[in-house]
Amino acid sequence: MIRKFAKYWRDSASLLVVARDRPTVHQEKYNYKVLVFKRTPKTSFMPNSVVFPGGGFDKQDSSLGWEAFFRNRNISTGALQQLTEVNGSRPYIFHTESTNLLDRNISLRLCALREAFEELGVLLITDEQKQKQRPYYSNYRQSFDVSTWQKRIHDGEASFLEMHTTLGTVPDVFNLYEWSCWLTPAMFRKRRFETAFFLAVLDEIPNIHPEPHEVQEYYWDTPASLLEAHREEKLWLAPPQTYELTRLSYIYDIDELARFAAQRNRKGSTLLCPVQYNAADGVIFVLPGDDLYPAGYDYISDNADLDKYGELPQEVI
């Protein structure tokens, strides 16, 4: 079945990975760092930008083969069902269109986990023993041939499900927390993505294996430091990354962040699609909830009032 908005944009998932780290002299407030990477110049979408790991939804992510996989690993149907019980608003990306497909609340998590492994070699898995010691936290696996599996999955020679079956591991969908949902603005007609963002919290920084065709370099840094580097034009963050890092920058303690993410996990998400206005000295983008955001916006049309404030400076608008 063709998804409702398939001709306008692709579905994707992204993963904010934060890991405990000792505070430094310059960033004594934060006891964690965030994982981001710089895209290569040849990347088809937003080359050279600094982003969170993530990418396009693949049919393997929604395969019903995962249901049999979870049963074989003694994961109860009830535990999986809890991931689908969300009380708040649901952007269309979370809508499951067919009973022949895995529930979107699960498959999007699998997509985010797969992409994080493909791009950076981070394999997040369930670990019941560690989970009892450190609730809300995810865990990772490193003691296997990461590079070979990473290449095989990236090149389509093996599936994410096949790798977990071989390793005897379970992807940690349970400690991936729904965080936000972003849609590329309508002005990018040919390259638009609706992206579900999830958050994963780790108790230590794992080893990284950057995929050479997609990853130019990677960074572990605090939210404030990454934002400062962006302001100083040492790196370039896309609007969703800037917005989400700004939100993170107000939380200094990783345990507090983990508790907050777990508590808001089932409260739903508002689709954040920036709308542009021209100004005399540049452009501004507004989001749902802002005074200038168009009422009843359909996420497809251009802003009819694009030039309404074109003669005014940004600070006045």
Image (cartoon, rainbow, N blue to C red):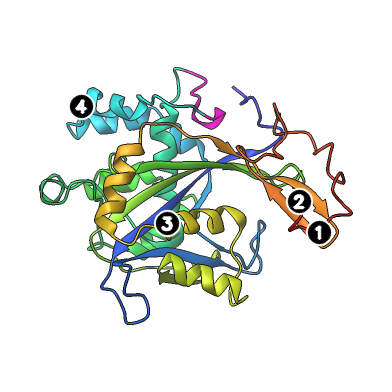
Classify 34 as above or below 240.
below
- Residue 253 visible, this orientation: yes
Which one is closest to the eye, mark 1 or mark 4? Answer: 1
Q: CA distance from mark 1 to mark 3?
A: 29 Å
Labels 1 and 2 touching (C-beta < 8 A): yes
Classify 19 as above or below 25.
above
What residue sits 77% from the left and 56% below the top? 283
**Quarter placement of the N terminus:** top right
Classify 36 as above or below 244.
below
Left or right placement of residue 173 versus residue 155 in this view: left
Marks 2 and 4, the one that precedes in the sequence? 4
Q: Residue furthest front?
A: 316
Residue 313 marker: 1
Q: CA distance from mark 2 to mark 4?
A: 53 Å
Residue 109 marker: none
Q: Residues within 10 Å of mark 3 (few under 14, many from 20)?
A: some
Which one is closest to the eye, mark 3 or mark 4? Answer: 3
Identify the residue under disc 3.
Answer: 248
Bounds of the magenta segment:
91-98
Q: Amino acid at mark 2?
A: Ile
Marks 3 and 4, the one that precedes in the sequence? 4
Identify the residue under disc 4.
Answer: 76
Q: Residues within 10 Å of mark 1 (few under 14, many from 20)?
A: some
Q: Amino acid at mark 4?
A: Ser
Which one is closest to the eye, mark 1 or mark 3? Answer: 1
Q: Main secondary structure of the magenta part?
A: loop
Which one is closest to the eye, mark 2 or mark 4? Answer: 2
Q: Residue 151, position in %: x, y?
A: 44, 60
Image quadrant assignment for residue 264: top left
Q: Amino acid at mark 1?
A: Pro
Image quadrant assignment for residue 235: bottom right
Q: Residue 275, position in %: x, y?
A: 71, 43
